[in-house]
């Protein structure tokens, strides 16, 4: 099947994928650009998964100060090379992640970073709630696990819905950038400051 070079260029402009990947995706999608985008997204996620084990020892620190200067965020996001760290795409990602922290107020980057005492406290609260609701003992553990998953989605940065596109998580967003930039990307840490809060 012959694929028009204008179609390849359009797909490349819309996805940032390489020329050969765009051609292959368009051939597989029989010239349908929307299907080709979906194919590339799946391919990108597969490529991103392979890069997750690579060490990220470069990166950027970004600051976001909310209008009115009563809320601010510092965030460190790592990548593999200073070349990627200096790209506009990486800078944009880091700044958007700082805005995410400002807006969504996570308490940890990932669930493994949450202190065990906080998790135990939440479990006890959920157990008590389930008992007060009259739930049978045999389903309480499942209810607690379900509510704990919801808790993680609210307080873990990587599991939160992305503020600019709630259809994806922050982790999904980062995987898109890993695929686009070709390097592992890791949110190392963040600090959120709000006037009057300790």
Image: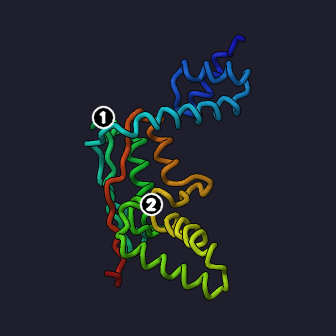
Lateral position of residue 136 relative to residue 107, left or right: right
Judge by depth and name the residue closer to the eye, 130 or 177.
130
The part of the image, by quadrant, that contains residue 188 is bottom left
Judged from the image, the secondary structure of the residue bearing numbered disc 1 is: helix
Q: Is residue 53 left or right of residue 45?
A: left
Which residue is outermost to the bottom? Answer: 132
Q: Residues within 10 Å of mark 1 (few under 14, many from 20)?
A: few
Residue at the extreme front of the image, as rendered: 138
In the displayed structure image, the side of residue 139 where residue 197 appears, left or right: left
Circle 2 residues within 10 Å: few <14, some 14–19, many ≥20? many
- Residue located 72% across and 22% down the image: 31
Give percent across and percent down for residue 184.
Answer: 38, 39
Q: Quadrant of the C terminus?
A: bottom left
Labelled pair 1, 2 in contact (Cβ < 8 Å): no
**Which residue was labeled with disc 2?**
157
Residue 187 horizontal/vertical position (percent): 36, 52
Q: Quadrant of residue 165?
A: bottom right
* 10 to 175, vertically: above or below: above
Residue positioned 56% across, 56% down in the render: 164
Residue 42 percent across, percent down from the top left? 59, 35
State which mark lies toward you, 1 or 2.
Answer: 2
Q: Earlier in the sequence, mark 1 or mark 2?
A: 1
Q: Residue at x 38, y 73 (%)?
A: 71
| Image mark for residue 49 | none
The residue pinned by badge 1 equals: 83
**Up-down relation of residue 89 to residue 34 (above or below):** below
Quadrant position of residue 20: top right
SS for callout 2: helix
Mark 1 vs mark 2, CA separation in Å: 26 Å
Q: Position of residue 51 (x, y in %)?
A: 40, 35
Q: Is residue 65 above or below residue 21?
A: below
Quarter that holds the N terminus: top right
């Amino acid at each position: 099947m012959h694929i028009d070079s204008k179609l390849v260029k359009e797909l490349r402009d819309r996805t940032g994928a390489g020329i050969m990947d765009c051609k292959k995706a368009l051939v597989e999608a029989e010239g349908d650009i929307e299907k080709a985008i979906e194919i590339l997204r799946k391919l990108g996620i597969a490529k991103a998964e392979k890069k997750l084990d690579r060490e990220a020892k470069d990166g950027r620190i970004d600051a976001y100060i909310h209008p009115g200067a009563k809320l601010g965020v510092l965030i460190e996001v790592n990548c593999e090379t200073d070349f990627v760290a200096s790209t506009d795409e990486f800078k944009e990602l880091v700044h958007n992640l700082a805005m995410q922290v400002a807006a969504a107020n996570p308490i940890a980057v990932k669930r493994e970073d949450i202190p065990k005492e906080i998790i135990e406290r939440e479990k006890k609260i959920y157990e008590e709630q389930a008992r007060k609701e009259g739930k049978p003992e045999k389903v309480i553990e499942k209810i607690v696990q379900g509510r704990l998953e919801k808790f993680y989605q609210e307080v873990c940065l990587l599991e939160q819905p992305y503020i600019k596109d709630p259809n994806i998580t922050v982790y999904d967003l980062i995987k898109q950038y890993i695929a686009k930039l070709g390097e592992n990307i890791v949110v190392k840490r963040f600090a959120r400051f709000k006037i009057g809060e300790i």
